[in-house]
Amino acid sequence: MPRSRRLARLAVLALCLLITPFAAPLAQEEGDAPRLASLDWTLAETLVALGHPPIALGQVAAYHAWVGEPALPDSVIDLGLRSQPNLERLAALAPEGILISPMFANLTPRLERIAPVSELALYAPGEAPWPQMLALTRELAARVGDPAAGEALIEATEARLAELRERLPEESEPLLIVQFMDARHVRVFGDGGLYPMVLERLGLENAWPGPTNAWGFSLASLEALAALEGRLVVVEPYPQGVEARLADSGLWQHQPSVSAERVITLPPVWSFGALPSATRFAELLVDALEAQP
């Protein structure tokens, strides 16, 4: 074979080798869900539960500290602070859409230069959380092109909550659900919040009688807690140094649940979450009540 022909064949072979590794993945991506990034943990946990996790998220380590589960896949890229995401990194990922909550609406003009931005809300004032969670689940399932996954998640959540309710006694004492802000103040959760919504669906009573803000909680002092009836449920994480200070706090030690050694402490559950957080909170709470009747 002439030298010129051999060189031509080698050139064609080399070109095929270069093209093939890239052509196959492109064919595999046809019909896949859109590549979405998010700055919001509630949207992210729901996408994970739907089986379509975001390609990137703000504050991945903090997500695991505050949300706990469902865990993010290792493939999810950390965008840095949710309020100040790394826009260069986000642009390099070339997402097909960016999902935010109203909390981050001020970032929309900058994010829109990278990809279309969708603002999805949950916990609208004056509206019950459960119907909002169902609507959000269906909206996200539609956006990833998998409505069946949304219905499956809703059905699984409802079935799990009903199953957990059956494990509880018919009569239980009221529960006072708090999360520490510092050594003297807590968020206490009432109407409009995820935790009390789960209590209602489990047939349990919420002990907080006071008003709440748009997120379903109120700030209260340890003095205020001491005057309330109800078994304390503390949702972690504690702010740094708070546990050590509580050990020396007379106010805390004289709280009825504390002095009776009947405080229930739960691992982190995202208090502003959707169906995945609702299920996680219900499971952890029922397990704790069974272990410490």
Image (cartoon, rainbow, N blue to C red):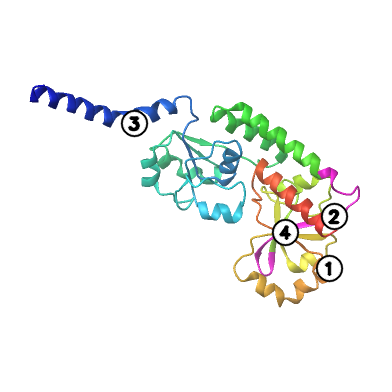
Q: Nearer the viewer, mark 1 or mark 3?
A: 3
Q: Amino acid at mark 1?
A: Pro
Q: Residue at x 91, y 47 (%)?
A: 170
- Marked residue nearer the N-terminal end (2 or 3): 3
- Marked residue nearer the N-terminal end (1 or 4): 4
Q: Secondary structure at mark 4?
A: strand
Quarter occupied by the N terminus? top left
The residue where tag 1 is placed is 256
Left or right: 242 in relation to 252 = left
Q: Amino acid at mark 2?
A: Pro
Residue 102 locus on image (x, y percent): 55, 42
Q: Are marks 1 and 3 in contact (CB under 8 Å)?
A: no
- Marked residue nearer the N-terminal end (2 or 1): 2
The residue where tag 4 is placed is 178
Number of residues whose C-alpha sits closer than 10 Å to that of mark 1, classed few (under 14), some (14–19) or many (20 or more):
some
Residue 58 locus on image (x, y percent): 49, 49
Left or right: 199 in relation to 102 = right
User: How far apart are the alpha carbons under marks 1 and 3?
Assistant: 65 Å
Number of residues whose C-alpha sits closer than 10 Å to that of mark 2, classed few (under 14), some (14–19) or many (20 or more):
some
Q: Nearer the viewer, residue 272 or 217?
A: 272
Marker disc for residue 22 = 3
- Marked residue nearer the N-terminal end (1 or 3): 3
Q: Residue at x 75, y 40 (%)?
A: 160
* Residues in magenta, as a range: 165-185
Q: Secondary structure at mark 1?
A: helix
Number of residues whose C-alpha sits closer than 10 Å to that of mark 4, classed few (under 14), some (14–19) or many (20 or more):
many
User: How far apart are the alpha carbons under marks 1 and 4?
Assistant: 15 Å
Residue 77 falls within the magenta-colored stretch? no
The residue where tag 2 is placed is 174
Q: Amino acid at mark 3?
A: Phe
Quarter occupied by the C terminus? bottom right
